[in-house]
Amino acid sequence: MSNDKGLLSGSITILIGAVIAIMALVRGPWQAWLLIGVFTLWGLWVVLILLLPYMQQAKRRRQRQQRERQLHAEGVSRSTFQVPELEEPISDDLLLRYANHRILTYLRSSYANACFEWCEPKPTELIRTNGTGRIRLYNVDDFDHADITFGKDAAIRCDLLRIVPLSKTEAGADDPNNIPPNKQPIDPRIWYENSGRTVLEALVADLNSRGHSKLTLRENGDICIQQGEELVPQEHLSNFPAKVYWPRLVEVFESNGLSAETTAQGIQVSW
């Protein structure tokens, strides 16, 4: 619009200059005809300037409508194609590969170089029947086996194991069955997914609704809140990891959106 105003003001300047020149240099009947011609040309120029934006807008509208018609025609032509339905069930090999990828992704979330082999002769039957099978682990510290459970809701549960031959124990002193649950080798991330997440998320939601912003996890697994000068237990976590695992457990809490730090009383979690 400012460009049009500039052209219009410039044309008025030219018109005034032309009129003055004609009146100063031309005498007689030619003067009137020249003035009429100049005013006519100036009028046509003004009309062109005023109509030019509308002409460009109409051109763009026609181009847009043409593109829309073209896209609509292409869409109609594509809609005639139908993806054929699979008449046969998923093969055992394909089903097993899907499950293997999910298990491997779960393991490598904590162990970057983990790999495994099935100990079961027909693992696909476990997948179809929601059973539990064992795998042999490699490149996984502190663990050499895992039990894989396929749930009816398509979830996969992984319980890490360490199998020690009885011949390597001394009077059963190193027998994992004689070690308290919270002293056995454990992966904090997997413990949180299997045992801690459900309890903590429900309790945090309840405490937050009542004005609390932090809790303390004691070494014995009790979840406590500060009431006055005392820590009052609210819930209990089974198989809570020993202190040696707390630094990694703090990282797990922080990766799940919670603030955590180790204190003399336990692990303080805030939100």
Image (spheres, rainbow, N blue to C red):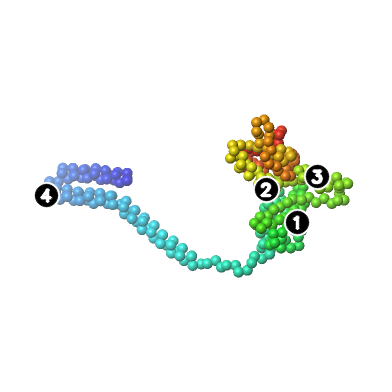
Where residue 117 sits: x, y (%)? 74, 57
SS at circle 4: helix
Residue situated in front as seen by the camera: 127 or 94? 127
Image point (68%, 41%), residue name: 235
Image point (75%, 53%), residue name: 146
> In the rendered structure, are the residues bearing label 3 and label 2 in contact, judged by CB atoms less than 8 Å apart?
no
Q: CA distance from mark 2 to mark 4?
A: 103 Å
Question: Disc 3 residue type?
Answer: Ile
Q: Is residue 211 visible?
A: yes
Mark positioned earlier in the residue sequence (4 or 3): 4
Identify the residue under disc 3.
Answer: 179
List the single residue furthest toward the left: 28
Mark positioned earlier in the residue sequence (1 or 4): 4
Identify the residue under disc 2.
Answer: 193
Q: CA distance from mark 2 to mark 1?
A: 19 Å
Mark positioned earlier in the residue sequence (3 or 2): 3
Q: Is 124 displayed left or right of 40 in the figure?
A: right
Question: Disc 4 residue type?
Answer: Pro
Identify the residue under disc 4.
Answer: 29
Q: CA distance from mark 4 to mark 3?
A: 124 Å
